[in-house]
Structures are given as structure tokens and as C-alpha cells.
Amino acid sequence: MQNRPSAAELLEALAELLEGTLMPALPPALQHRARVGANLARIVQREIEFGPAAGQRENELLAVVPEGDERALWQALTEVVRADLEIAKPGYDTWEGE
């Protein structure tokens, strides 16, 4: 049994405190630092939640890429990067580019 709140829940509470409560009360010169702190807390939260599955999926994808198959490697790496972006910068993981 895991104690509540979980680490991910604590990080979300920290992010909300920094962004929702403290940031508006801070002078403009410090608001950016509070925003950065909130974003860092959310990145760590997502790493806790999604990181283990993303790491396992990365190992599975790369393990089945045939040697010399650049297209399959590219597809696997694209999926790996999308999983990393889902953690670090949600929304960027769906970009299709040109």
C-alpha cells in the first residue's frame, strides 16, 4: 500500500502553490522563477507517472529493430522522442512537422 498523497500528487500541489498562489503575489522580477519552478515540478511529476512505461517501451522498440533497417530505426526513434516530449513538453509530442 502506498501512502497518500503520492509523490506525483505532492509535485502537482507544489506546482499549483507556486503558480496559482505565490506567482501572482511576487514582484514581476521573481514571477518567472516561480513559473519555472512550477514547470519543473510538473516535469518531474510526469516523469514519475510516465517514465517507467516510456523506458520499457523504448527498450522494446529498439530491441526489435532489424540491423541496418534505417526506416524501422527512424520509426522507433520517433516514437521514443515523442514519449520523451510527452513528459518534458506535452503538446509537442503530436507535432507532425514538415
Image: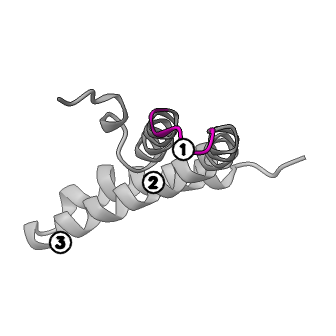
Taking depth in this image into account, of 16 and 87 the one nearest to the observer is 87
Mark 3 or mark 1: which comes first in sequence?
3
39 displayed left or right of 68: left
> Which range is magenta?
66-71
Q: What residue type is disc 2 on?
A: Ile
Q: Is residue 76 magenta?
A: no
**Most prominent secondary structure in the magenta stretch?**
loop
Badge 2: residue crowd in 10 Å (few <14, some 14–19, many ≥20): many
Mark number, residue 11? none
Badge 1: residue crowd in 10 Å (few <14, some 14–19, many ≥20): few
Mark 2 or mark 1: which comes first in sequence?
2
Q: Secondary structure at mark 3?
A: helix
Contact between labelled residues 1 and 2, with CB atoms less than 8 Å apart: no
Distance between mark 2 and mark 3 Cα atoms? 20 Å
Q: Secondary structure at mark 2?
A: helix
Mark 2 or mark 3: which comes first in sequence?
3
The residue indicated by pointer 1 is 68
Taking depth in this image into account, of 9 and 97 the one nearest to the observer is 97
Taking depth in this image into account, of 22 and 3 the one nearest to the observer is 3
Q: Quadrant of residue 97?
A: top left
Q: What residue type is disc 3 on?
A: Leu
The residue indicated by pointer 3 is 30
Q: Secondary structure at mark 1?
A: loop
**Quadrant of the image containing the C terminus:** top left
The residue indicated by pointer 2 is 43
Distance between mark 2 and mark 1 Cα atoms? 35 Å
Residue 36 vertical position relative to residue 78 in the rendered view, above or below? below
Residue 62 image position (x, y, % from top left): 62, 44
Residue 77 image position (x, y, % from top left): 47, 43
75 displayed left or right of 4: left
